[in-house]
Amino acid sequence: MIQQNLQLDAQGRLRHFLTTEGLSRQHLTEILDLAESFAMVSGKSVKKVPLLRGKTIVNLFFETSTRTRTTFELAATRLSADVQSINIATSATSKGESLLDMLHNLEAMHCDMFVVRHADSGAAHFIARHVAPHVSVINAGDGRHAHPTQAMLDMFTIRRHKGDFSQLKVAIIGDIMHSRVARSQIHALNTLGVGELRVIGPKTLIPPAASTLGVRIFHDMAQGLADVDVVITLRLQKERMRGALLPSEGEFFQRYGLTEKKLALAKPDAIVMHPGPINRGVEIASSVADSPQSVILEQVSHGLAVRMAVMSMVLGRQPLGDSGAED
Ligand code: CP
């Protein structure tokens, strides 16, 4: 098990943000509340606030990304931090430099935060254990383990549309087994007191231990989707699959792809979510992804406010509930 309290300082405040697991409801709610004030900043003509002026943030993306990397860059810029995104392919790691040597060299340039995406589960925790005391680490997705800022922008989106988590039935569909997003969502939803949490998918894509995570397991879409308020679809994480876990994408879509017909089994005002990137015609039909019930692009917008909130909390400059925005 990966160490949890590494991400809290002696006062119990977020020093790193590595996982939603083990954080209190108060921590998660503070992130959501602060993100609300940053969402207001995004609607203003001048979108910058001076909260992280003088801080240096380095993005280390060892894996591909569109949404997470761009919103972290924009969020840092809007907080007035200096931000550098290292191109891993052209960095000195290709000359044999180790990860730790790379980090220590970047620390020597007086950086204050690393935002890390890595294919290996536990990579962000490893880095957090080795950085200087003044440096913070945010996990931007590690292997199949965790993607905490994605989960928090998803919580933000759900709260905005549906309010009280305790009244909600939420279903997560598809490749639970390989999904760091699902894992982080499950911890966050349970901590925030969700009414009922379901996972739906084939036996090969739901880990046997899922029932210990406080979810109800369904292998049948009609049963799993009945009466739910929030439907979360997931991409098949083929890059993390070992061996053939599915007969074919076509068969997967037939049984578990979210079509208008299957969505009609949920509540009429159910929202449809997806962390992206979406594979149309595999886990979701285009007609659903582009429907009025879809909040997929809203999730992306909310990523900016949530990442601003997390960065400002972790760097300890932000009194909670005050974004520092000027009218
Ligand atoms: N949701 C998500 O992590 O997307 P990216 O891989 O594009 O960052």
Image (cartoon, rainbow, N blue to C red):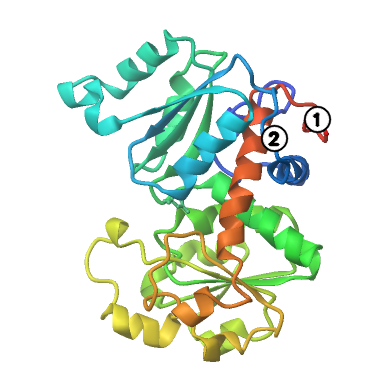
> Which dot, 2 or 1, sits closer to the camera?
2
Report whether 73 appears left or right of 324: left
Say which residue label 2 marks. Answer: 46
Category of crowding for the residue at label 1, using alpha-carbon neighbours closer than 10 angstroms: few (below 14), some (14–19), many (at least 20): few
Circle nearer the N terminus (2, 1): 2
Q: Quadrant of the C terminus?
A: top right
Report whether 137 appears left or right of 292: left
Residue drawn at 48 percent across, 45 percent down = 68
Residue 278 circle label: none
Question: Does the beta carbon at disc 1 come under 8 Å from ligand 1?
Answer: no
Residue drawn at 49 percent across, 85 percent down = 259
Category of crowding for the residue at label 2, using alpha-carbon neighbours closer than 10 angstroms: few (below 14), some (14–19), many (at least 20): few
Residue situated in front as seen by the camera: 116 or 186 = 116
Q: Amino acid at mark 2?
A: Val
Look at the numbered disc 2 and give the secondary structure of its residue.
loop
Query: Which quadrant of the figure has residue 48?
Result: top right
- How many marks the image carries: the answer is 2
Report whether 278 appears left or right of 51: left
Q: Is residue 129 above or below residue 275?
A: above
Residue drawn at 60 percent across, 83 percent down = 225
- Asked if the residues shown at circle 2 and circle 1 are in contact, with their CB atoms under 8 angstroms apart, the answer is yes
Picture coordinates of residue 194 (x, y %)? Answer: 73, 63
Query: Which quadrant of the figure has residue 271?
Result: bottom right
Say which residue label 1 marks. Answer: 326
Residue drawn at 41 percent across, 39 percent down = 117
Picture coordinates of residue 193 (x, y %)? Answer: 75, 59
Picture coordinates of residue 18 (x, y %)? Answer: 54, 37
Q: Amino acid at mark 1?
A: Glu
